[in-house]
Amino acid sequence: MKVVDLFLLAINNLKRRKFRTVLTVLGVVIGTSSIVVMVSLGLGMSESLLQSFKNSGSLTKINISNYGGMADNTGKKAAVQLTDDSLKQLETIPHVTGVSPSLEVPITAKFGAYEANYSIRGVSQAYFSQMKLKEGTTPPAGDSELTLVYGNTVGSSFHKVKNWQDSYVANPMKDTIFYIFPEKQVSNPNGVSKDQPETANNKPQKKYILKTAGIMEGTAEDYSEESMYAYADIDTLKAFLKKIYKKDLVPDPKTGKNGKPLRYYVYDEAYVFVDDMKNVSEVQKTITDMGYSAYSNLEWLKQSQDSINMVQMVLGGIGAVSLLVAAIGIMNTMMMSIFERTKEIGVMKVLGCDMGDIRNMFLTESALIGFFGGLIGIALSYGISAIINSLTGGGGSDVLSDFTNGGEGQLSLIPAWLALFAIGFAMLVGMLSGYFPSVRAMKLSPLAAIRNE
């Protein structure tokens, strides 16, 4: 029997029992749509999380510090300092495209009756090249005047000094903000800071006005590890601080074993930029082997994706139960069809119909039930997905929008491969459900089938 004949015969047989066929297809529709929607939620959350990191350019950035340290011959961890020389060594690591130290200075910012406390971070041009701005530009290298790029949440940190309750959202591009830098301090070998006697006086603190170069991309509600800082070119910041703190370089200089301030820069943190996300783990291991403490957002992404995959498996399992019930329904439909068409099967055998054709006829019917159920189920899934995304993207639910970068992503994502896989899987489930009934039909005795009433 030709494939076309099998197909047309299966269609006609399904039409003869329309109501039963519709109910069976409906079971497959519910099962397919349940699995697809459940899986799409996991895919949507995973893609939204990945896009969030990609937008910030942080998946190829490694944060390093000297808090780790390698054990010396006494078993104690020796400090590995982050200096300008050690940063040059990091630049030689394969796949590293840039290295930036982080020189952090806490400041007090004043605007009228309002005040805010945050830090200025001195970074290199390699760091600025990864930064996305909402407006303005990044400070040029070697600029003679200290200019700042503000994190997107810095402006919302101003409060009245009297009660710290009334707040003000400053616009650094327009507002004139005065800066007060901290008094000179010295950290002793135990890490405790104390005011230098010559600076511990009651003189009025000097205020500085610094120009604004730009503001980072994002809203005042988009908090991140970078959003609460103001950024400056590190060489320009060093020159500016040297005018204030003279030989001590910074307000809280590190000290040597003799207790005297070091005359070179020692950074608490630095950033390494890698050419591709797939090379981050290799570069991070190399940095760790050098004695530094290193971490990247790729680690957090993998952990988050593992958690999302676990949730996705649970949700997919719940949907699979519906498809299992649908498979039982297909098997039941095929068995009832065999009982009702026993004489017809007997006549086909007497007329010399091939046993394989009889089996294939029932397998084709069950496959078509799976196909139509899967096709309609996918269409229903796209509709449900659109509703979910309209609720999260259109501000209908603040709780759901937390999973989608504030509504920019999609909580439910159905790629083409998932739709095709769902239809194919539904057909496979239909054929597996119809296999045993088809084998039963093939084994029926012709004479007994003809005598059946």
Image (tube, grey):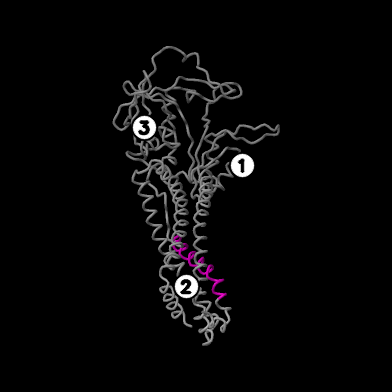
> Which labelled disc corresponds to residue 147?
3
Q: Amino acid at mark 1?
A: Asp
Instruction: Farthest residue to the top: give it.
Output: 202
Residue 55 or residue 347, whichever sits in front: 347
- Location of mark 1 (residue): 289
**Cα separation between marks 3 and 1:** 37 Å
Q: Where 305 falls versus 195 (above or below)?
A: below
Instruction: Farthest residue to the right: give it.
Output: 74
Q: Amino acid at mark 2?
A: Glu
* Mark whose residue sits in front, 1 or 2: 2
For this view, does 390 lie left or right of residue 276?
left
Badge 1 density bin: few <14, some 14–19, many ≥20, Cα 10 Å = few
Residue 45 or residue 188, whichever sits in front: 45
Badge 3 density bin: few <14, some 14–19, many ≥20, Cα 10 Å = many
Badge 2 density bin: few <14, some 14–19, many ≥20, Cα 10 Å = many
Check if residue 434 falls in the magenta segment.
yes
Asked if labels 1 and 3 touch by Cβ distance under 8 angstroms, the answer is no
| Image coords of residue 144 (percent x, y) | 37, 31
Please identify the quarter of the rendering in which residue 213 is found: top left
**Cα separation between marks 1 and 2:** 63 Å
Q: Which residues are magenta?
A: 417-440
Q: Where 346 falls versus 26 (above or below)?
A: below
